[in-house]
Image (cartoon, grey):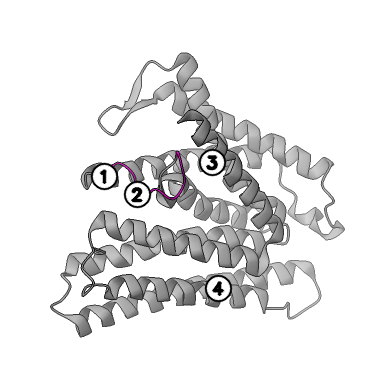
Amino acid sequence: MFWTRLGSGILLVAAAIVLITAGGPVLAAALCLISVIAYRELGKALGFITDDKKKRALEYTGTALTALYYIWVFFSVSLQSAPVSSVPAAHLYMNISIYRALAFGMVAAFIVYLFAYVLLFPAYHGREVTAACFSFLYAPVMLSFLYLIRDGFLMGKYLVWFVFLCSWGSDTCAYAVGVLIGKHKMTPKLSPKKSIEGAVGGVVGAALLSALYACLMERYFSMPSYTESYSLSIGAAAALGAAGALVSMVGDLAASAFKRDYGIKDYGKLIPGHGGIMDRFDSMIVTAPLIFIGLSFIMAG
């Protein structure tokens, strides 16, 4: 199991490097596919997607909405151009296009689910429609922040890696510290193996990794001259890393709580040694939006 998990982890990291480097339509399409799978995993876990072939409407609705949402976000970001030549104005304009895409996408999806509820009534109970709408926001929308950071910021191809440092990096640090000195259980009823010492190690580790990465960005990466006004200080990077790690742990525990509530071991079997998409991306799903918000304030300069 260890070697299977390790091998899958290496492949995931390699895939992340390729997709993030590519960005654009390649990353958007990949995240769309991942989001569709995550939506279906949540649907099966929460019970609004079943083996009953006569009740597939919410599954198809969510799949279609995910595809349309990513198309909308992609074109909203990629087809915008700055109204003036100054970089600060271009940066602000791009952010406005992102916020517009998010607002329209989420509101439109909510209205579609209301239509589905009314038109299909009484085929689906209110709690099933609520769970479907929640799953759409939980997976497709939250995961889209990876793309929004990568292609929505001037330095997105560098900044997006903070998401991975805060989620996968903090998880590794938390595991290492927990194994070495972990004694006090953090949430014994929810995740007996997680310790308070490990949690602290994860937060501190992510802060240090983020600070180190900020130093590397400034010193070694080929940064355009116009990014000087958007420099990321070591202190800001460390704070962002610590906050991201904390939220990452909450995301991990929340996904575990859903599994315990609904009596399942894993969300799926797609990734050998890890489970499903939701089992591997549970922390990143909530970390990406926080990093986006943090960067929006830090890089507003």
Q: Few, some or many C-alpha atoms within 10 Å of disc 1 (few <14, some 14-19, many ≥20)?
A: few
| Amino acid type shown at disc 3 | Ser
| Amino acid type shown at disc 4 | Val
Q: Is residue 46 above or below residue 184?
A: below
As drawn, the label of residue 264 is 1
Q: Nearer the viewer, mark 3 or mark 1?
A: 3
Which residue lies under the disc numbered 3?
8
Q: Few, some or many C-alpha atoms within 10 Å of disc 4 (few <14, some 14-19, many ≥20)?
A: many
Horizontal placement of 13 versus 87: left or right? left
Q: Which residues are magenta?
A: 264-273
Q: Which type of secondary structure does the marked residue at label 2 adopt?
A: loop
N-terminal-most mark, 4 or 2: 4
- Residues marked 2 and 1 touching at CB (< 8 Å): yes
Say if residue 175 shows up in the picture: yes
N-terminal-most mark, 3 or 2: 3
Q: Nearer the viewer, mark 4 or mark 2?
A: 2
Q: Residue at x 50, y 35 (%)?
A: 4
> Residue 301's x, y, as percent?
70, 57
Q: Choose between 197 and 72: the one closer to the eye.
A: 72
Horizontal placement of 159 versus 286: left or right? right
As drawn, the label of residue 267 is 2
Q: Nearer the viewer, mark 4 or mark 1?
A: 1
| Amino acid type shown at disc 1 | Ile
N-terminal-most mark, 3 or 1: 3
Q: Few, some or many C-alpha atoms within 10 Å of disc 2 (few <14, some 14-19, many ≥20)?
A: many
Report how far apart the C-alphas of labels 4 and 1 lie in the structure.
33 Å
Report how far apart the C-alphas of labels 2 and 1 lie in the structure.
7 Å
Which residue lies under the disc numbered 4?
73
- Residues marked 3 and 2 touching at CB (< 8 Å): no
